[in-house]
Amino acid sequence: MPQYDLYHDEVKNALSKDGWTITDDPYTLEYKGLRLYADLGAEKLLGAQKSEQKIAVEIKVFNSVSQITELQKAIGQYNMYRSILRRISPDRKLYLAISEEVYQDFFQKPAIQDIVSDQTIYLIIFDPEREVIIQWLN
């Protein structure tokens, strides 16, 4: 079983406050003998359309000495998860959840923005203290 990230419960609570139903904790990705775990799976009913939006969420803290190394690991993990999701649950979008502080201090650097854009990484920006979603970036 995977180890929970520092902000696991805060992101889970923030998603719930935002109207999401947590369906998987963790979200298991199984494909051709490989088993990986994203932190959360969630669904949300979309109003008049009566259709469901499904997401998988990987939470990252970026609290090590090298945020670049953390980003390299996160991108590799994100791309693996996205590759498997395309095969097992193509209707589910993958998001990387990061704190507002990390977003402001690290992800606002032009080079990091270019990398995130080039990799087509969807972000959830959250406030861990208030346990709320600040922004969704697709």
Image: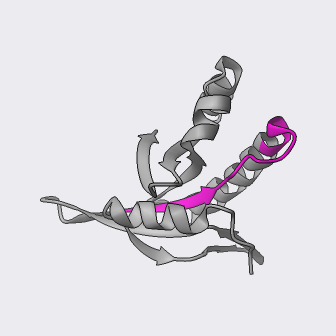
Furthest toward the left, the residue is 48
Q: How many marks?
A: 0
In the image, is residue 3 part of the stretch drawn in magenta?
Answer: no
**Between residues 110 and 103, which one lies in front from this camera angle?**
103
Q: Quadrant of residue 58?
A: bottom right
Q: Quadrant of the N terminus?
A: bottom right
Q: Residue at x 66, y 58 (%)?
A: 81
Q: Residue at x 67, y 53 (%)?
A: 60
Numbered range of the magenta stretch: 53-70
Q: Position of residue 78 (x, y in %)?
A: 68, 51
The chosen color scheme is one colour
Q: Position of residue 69 (x, y in %)?
A: 85, 41
Q: Residue at x 68, y 27 (%)?
A: 112
Q: Quadrant of residue 54?
A: bottom left
Q: Give the left or right position of residue 83, taking residue 122 as reference.
A: right
Q: Position of residue 46 (x, y in %)?
A: 23, 60
Furthest toward the top, the residue is 110
